[in-house]
Amino acid sequence: MFIAFLLTTVQVVLAQGPPPPGVDDEKMETLRIAFLTRYLDLTTDEAQKFWPVYNQMRGELKIVMDKEMDLRKGKSLNDMNDEELTKLINAHFENEQAILNIKKKYADEFKNVLPLRKVALLADAENEFKREVLKNFRDKQGPPGGGGGGGRPGGGPDFKP
């Protein structure tokens, strides 16, 4: 049961990493910038101060997330002994703590460049961006078993990575 929890948590962390297959990184970053700028309603002055700090945070998070991805690279849980599984679990929690520490550090940094309300909205904005990307990706994949995906149900505007 704990291993299932661990795998689910790893999948969530990995979902924060690279974009879905077939989506280039540059386009994804352009979409992220536009989405967060709009969601947070950043003024020009706020954006000029916010993006360098945000990009620095993302760089630090990427290092930790890459370590997380490397934990199981080429390994199967079924082939690991108890000692290896223990090391995997401990390393996972160390990475989770590192991610939390980075986010806390940058929350303080963001308070220096944004109004507190916008700092509080940032996590919501990032989560909503991920939801939109995943939803769009699933829509394009279509239902399991074949078929193409369509646009957004209900006729709303498409979010196209």
Image (cartoon, grey):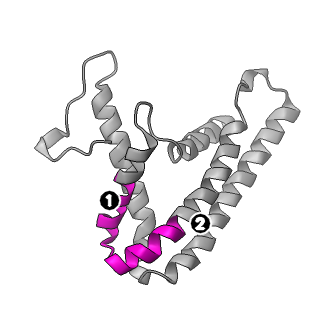
Is residue 152 something that shows in the picture? Answer: yes
| Image side of residue 85 versus residue 102, left or right | right
Question: Can you say whether 23 is above or below 101 in the image?
Answer: above
Q: Quadrant of residue 151?
A: top left
Q: Position of residue 64 (x, y in %)?
A: 67, 52
Is 146 or 109 nearer to us in this picture?
A: 109
Labels in figure, total: 2
Callout in the foreground (2, 1): 1
Q: Quadrant of residue 50?
A: bottom left
| Image side of residue 97 versus residue 103, left or right | right
Q: Position of residue 59 (x, y in %)?
A: 60, 57
| Image side of residue 140 versus residue 113, left or right | left
Q: Which residues are magenta?
A: 31-54
Say which amino acid is labelled 1. Answer: Ala
Q: Label for residue 103?
A: 2
Is 46 or 106 nearer to us in this picture?
A: 46
Q: Position of residue 96 (x, y in %)?
A: 67, 54
Decide: few, some or many residues near mark 1? Use Cα within 10 Å; few <14, some 14-19, many ≥20. few
Residue picked out by circle 1: 34
Q: Residue at x 34, y 70 (%)?
A: 40
